[in-house]
Image (cartoon, grey):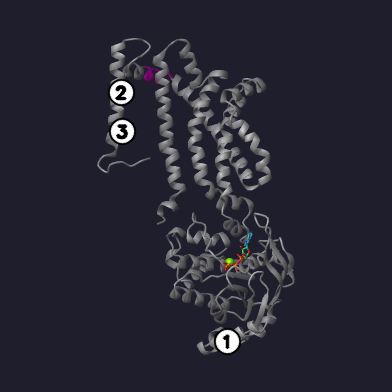
Amino acid sequence: MSKSAPTSPLIYQLLSIVGGLAIWFVAAKLTASPLLPGPVQVVGFIREAMISGEMPYHMAMTLGRVAASFVIAMALGLAIGLAMGQSQLTDRIGDPWLIFFLNTPALVIIIMAYVWFGLTEAAAIGAVALNKIPNVAVTVREGARTLDPHLDDLARIYRLSKIERLRQVVLPQLQPFFAAAARSGISLIWKIVLVVELLGRSNGVGFQLYLYFQLFDVTAILGYTLVFVALMIAIEVFMVQPYERYATRWRIRSA
Amino acid sequence: MNVMQRAGASAPLEIRISDKTYAGADGNAVQAVKGLDLSCPGQTCTALVGPSGCGKTTILRIVAGLDAKFSGEVTLADAPIEEARIGFIFQEPTLLPWRTVEDNIRLAAPDLSARALASLLDQAEIADKASRFPGELSLGLARRVSIVRAIAAKPDLLLLDEPFVSLDEATAKTLRMLVARILDDHAVTALLVTHDLREAVELADQIVTLTARPARAKSVRQISTPRAKRTAAFRKKLLGQIDRDAKSR
Ligand SMILES: Nc1ncnc2c1ncn2[C@@H]1O[C@H](COP(=O)(O)OP(=O)(O)OP(=O)(O)O)[C@@H](O)[C@H]1O
Ligand SMILES: [Mg+2]
């Protein structure tokens, strides 16, 4: 987050947003087509869908899938990255597969998961996680390669248990890498989750978007998009950023 | 307290390293220690004095059980070193930057009572720094924390790797006094590594000078005069004697 002029840093961002809305409003008025509804109609749709409970329900389904695949991808990616960063043998064995999965299109993984494991919740979440794991693993591996051997000596001298060593010594060193992976992880995951829902689930934002696409209901599509993006930004601002500030407080306070 | 009496109080630290060779990254092996054979009486301080890069840290890491790739044997009180409780004052303070001073110390000594901790911090004159993060400390202060951490768990063996290096003389002097007090007050066997003979004659009960790499003992000298009674004149005379010992080899 860049802090611009000390005067009023928010004013330009606000102006930019308002300007965008204005252009949208005018463009919708000029075209007067159902394919480009104006902000007023979209907000109207959002209100209705909120009141009817339709939107909260599908939103919750999607968020649940995002959360589940995020946790799985981060945990497995962390374990794999750590193992590969610390052992050359594991690295050599795992590397071709990492490259393979990094270069496999998300769509292929999703289709294969549905083909092999059926149109199930587990297949959906697993496919999303599998798409993200290689990225997390690569980033964490970078961090694991730079672990400070002196801190390792420290952990051994003072007989820290494996768990303690991980919690007190290893994970804090990986924190910046983990944070980077988490940050890019959330934005990638929620995009893939929508595709998974579109292809093989009967609820969630992706499913709704597909439904409204078939109906050519652009108002609904824009309504879902806006709310979903807003939600993701809120998660970033109110969960990810405060967590990062907490995790790096010792660095901020240091000279 | 007399050195000989103390030596009888517990069995010694025996260090036998016939060979320690690092396999260099590019294929050229580096022999760091060769034929080192040392006996350090229990509850005394032995200083290892040697030139930069001769293998001092290597010896300490082997003694600490951190490096098992060597030929030889290290025992404390006739038991393998892995069973001993060890306090290690690393060449760098090696504090966890994300834990406060207090939490860094507690990591090494989880059972330390609040009172014991306060008293240790007091002795090291860092009582006001307990809730600071290491990034906020000067090198001298960080070294104090590292010293407190090493003794907090009441170790059987205390290893000190150049604990006073790159400090200004005043700070180095206070830290030497702190270490001297610890050696006098705690019944601990200590191994002090330094390249500065003057530190050794101030703190140690036995001084071993080392050759350049690969490290081997060049001279060994016992000092029976208690630390507190070593005058400037006494230390100067001792320095001259050790110099001659080392040269006559
Ligand atoms: N992990 C390692 N791999 C390869 N060579 C090493 C390794 N550690 C140390 N050495 C080499 O072994 C020799 C002794 O190193 P050591 O760190 O024990 O010396 P030292 O006496 O502690 O030096 P200093 O006074 O600089 O602390 C040096 O030549 C060093 O380059
Ligand atoms: Mg050294």
Which three-letter amino acid code belongs to the residue tagged 3?
Answer: Gln
Residue at the spot 66% in from the left edge and 81% down from the top edge? B220
The image quadrant that residue B61 belongs to is bottom right
Q: Main secondary structure of the magenta part?
A: helix
Left or right: B97 as drawn, with respect to A130? left
Label of residue A43 in the image: none
Q: Position of residue A169 (x, y in %)?
A: 56, 53
A140 is higher (above) or lower (below) than B104:
above
Is any atom of residue B1 visible in this view? no
Which three-letter amino acid code belongs to the residue tagged 1?
Answer: Gly
Label of residue A13 in the image: 3
Residue at the spot 31% in from the left edge and 10% down from the top edge? A32
* Chain for disc number 2: A
Q: Residues within 10 Å of mark 3 (few under 14, many from 20)?
A: few
Highlighted range, magenta? A45-52
* Eye-nearest disc, 2 or 1: 1
Residue matched to label 1 = B240
* Chain for disc number 3: A
Residue at the spot 49% in from the left edge and 40% down from the top edge? A180
Have a look at marks 3 and 2 and say if they share a chain.
yes
Is any atom of residue B126 visible in this view? yes
Q: In the rendered structure, does residue A46 fall within the stretch colored magenta?
A: yes
Residue matched to label 2 = A21
The image quadrant that residue B72 belongs to is bottom right
